[in-house]
Every structure is written in structure tokens, then in C-alpha cells.
Amino acid sequence: MTAIAAELGFKAFLASQGWSDNRCRRDIRHDLEKALASAREAGLSGEGDELAEVLAVLNAYYPRHAFDHFAGDPAFALRARAAVARLFDTVRPYVEGSGGE
């Protein structure tokens, strides 16, 4: 669920920057590292380096729907949730400023 939340957070930011839903589906799909790179290219900043580290781990499993092979520890899960929560805090003003909720 944390990976899905990150994906949706990035796609919400990109939508606030004029990306269409179809473009997000076509260009990002479920690739969290590509989503981060695209968001940064579109002007996202302030999300922190820890997010990139967390996404690298999640991205090894998420795009291939392979979390049944994930052997993460509880400490990573807490770190990942916190990083994605900070992403939401960073994205929120962009989304609200574009008229989204």
C-alpha cells in the first residue's frame, strides 16, 4: 500500500503540472523511480533524499507485482511510510494550488 500511495502522490503532483491521466499511465506506469524523476523534472523539490532510497527498494518489487518475494523488515516499513507521508506533505500545496483536492 505504501508503494501505491507513492505512485498516486507522484501522479497527483504531475497532474497538477498539466500531465494527463493517460500520459501518467503511458510514461510512468508503476515505476516509482521514473515517477520521482519525472516529478523532479516538472519542478518538485523538497521531498528529501530518503524518499529516493525507499523508492529504490520498493521499485525492485512494485512494477512487477512481486511483493510476495519482499523480505523487508518492520523498520523499513516505518521508514517507507514516513518518507511517503513527507511526499504527500510536499505535494499537497501543488495539488491544492491547481484546484485539486
Image (cartoon, grey):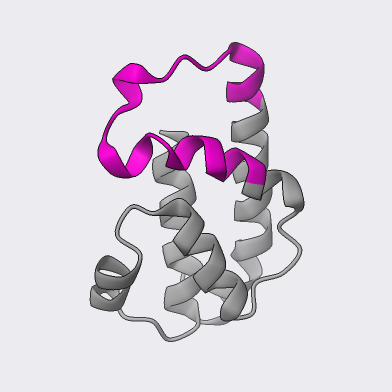
Which SS type dominates the magenta stretch? helix
Q: Position of residue 98 (x, y in %)?
A: 52, 82
Name the image quarter holding residue 82: top right
Q: Is residue 3 above or below residue 73?
A: below
Name the image quarter holding residue 55: top right
Is residue 31 left or right of 87 when viewed as pictured? left
Residue, x 58% and y 23% (percent of image)? 77
Name the image quarter holding residue 48: bottom right
Q: Is residue 32 above or below residue 91?
A: above
Q: Is residue 93 above or below residue 80?
A: below
Quadrant assignment for the N terminus = top left
Q: Is residue 68 magenta?
A: yes
Q: Position of residue 72 (x, y in %)?
A: 52, 17
Q: What segment is highlighted magenta in the picture?
A: 53-78
Residue, x 76% and y 63% (percent of image)? 46
Residue in the foreground of this view, choosing between 58 and 80: 58
**Residue 99 in sight:** no
Residue found farthest to the bottom: 18
**Residue 22 in sight:** yes
Q: Position of residue 79 (x, y in %)?
A: 67, 29
Q: Position of residue 86 (x, y in %)?
A: 69, 48
Is residue 95 left or right of 30 when viewed as pictured? right
Q: Is residue 40 magenta?
A: no
Residue, x 35% and y 65% (percent of image)? 28
Q: Is residue 67 above or below residue 20?
A: above
